[in-house]
Image (tube, grey):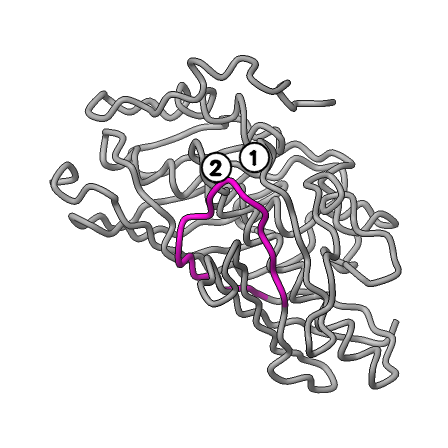
Amino acid sequence: MNRDLPPGADQGEARQPIPAGLAFDPARVTKMLTRYGHGGWLGMRYHGHGEDWVELALPWREELVGVAATGVLASGPIISLMDNATSLSVWTRRGTFTPQVTVDLRVDYVRAAVPGRTVIGRGECYKLTRNIAFVRGVAYDQHLEDPVAHVVGTFMTLDGAAAG
Amino acid sequence: MSAEDPLVVAEGKVLPPYAQGLGIAIDHHDSHGMPVLGVDFSDRIQGRPGFLHGGALSGLMEMAAIAAVQTVLAARGDVVRIKPVNVSVEFLRGGTQQRTYAVGRVTRAGRRLVVVGAEAWQDDPEKPIASALMNVMISPA
């Protein structure tokens, strides 16, 4: 499946930044964010959310594999999944979209994801300050209690005043 | 269920599908003999509009780190399986729409555990856009 957009195609709506100040809807925004770019290429989808968490799904496919002989997913797609899920959890908890950047992210690879299974990334924003959002999360391929990866990280808002 | 290495990159071997899909390839070797990986900017590795995605950048650095581990271990005659334990990534600058490079540096190669760092940059190697520190387990292939 080729998710690449031809140059210049369908970049109007999708490329526009999410309007700041609007009520944040993770399902809608995920749809926008996965129409193009890295999230689109990976094939991420919205899976669920709560007050301070968001789940994204990453369906297995051959192009995302790290070891061709085994079919095990590469670790890069897992990091990207968790980067996006935790990032969305910050906006979800904040209730609005504020531009932010990832400061750092640490991933523990608890076990290899089972080939063929969709991996779910659950990101949670457990603390929000004016400038920094603290996040954690797990990636799992069947049960939340049996993760394939565990992450912690921080985001910094690019517009401290708007975050108040 | 397989507990095989989730990530493998090796000189002379075909890069994993994930790397090929993103356009990651060995660009050259640095003065320490370590493979420098390069990737052109494309929609496939874009995060917020105009900038490199942090996850794609992390993936690039992880592959550079693993390639460095394989280079160092091959030099001492070891053929091993590599299994990432964890990675810690610091994002230092926004990656813009240009070619990105990454190279790994083995800090300590023990018999079972290897500590390896990696850095990524764009036009100026003195201005890294991200750095990573990884622990990987090794076992005889």
Q: Secondary structure at mark 2?
A: loop
Q: Mark 1 falls within which chain?
A: A
- Which of the numbered marks, if any, corresponds to residue B135? none
Q: How far is disc 1 from disc 2 in space, using C-alphas?
A: 6 Å
Instruction: Tell me residue B58's x, y (percent).
Output: 55, 54
Quadrant hosting residue B74: bottom right
Q: Position of residue A68 (x, y in %)?
A: 84, 47
Using the rendered view, name the quadrant where residue B92 is placed: bottom left
Q: Amino acid at mark 2?
A: Gly
Q: Position of residue B136 (x, y in %)?
A: 66, 71
- What kind of residue is marked 1? His
Q: Tell me whether the residue at label 1 lies in contact with that at label 2, contact meaning CB atoms closer than 8 angstroms.
A: yes
Let me know if residue B88 is in the magenta part: yes
Residue in the foreground of this view, choosing between A85 and A97? A97
- Outermost residue on the front side: it is B123
Position of A58 with respect to B21 (left or right) is left
Residue at 72% across, 81% down: B112
Query: Is B31 inside the magenta-drawn segment?
Result: no
Pointers 1 and 2 within a single chain: no
| Position of B55 relative to B43 (above/below) | below
**Quadrant for the C terminus of chain B in the image:** bottom right
- Horizontal side, residue A126 vs residue B6: left or right: left
**Residue at label 1?**
A38
- Indicate which disc residue B47 carries: 2
Q: Which stretch did the figure color magenta?
A: B86-103
Position of residue B6 relative to residue A87, above or below, is below
Please tell me how crowded label 2 is: few (under 14), some (14-19), or many (20+) other residues with Cα within 10 Å.
Answer: many
Query: Horizontal placement of A33 versus B37: left or right?
Result: left
Q: Secondary structure at mark 1?
A: helix
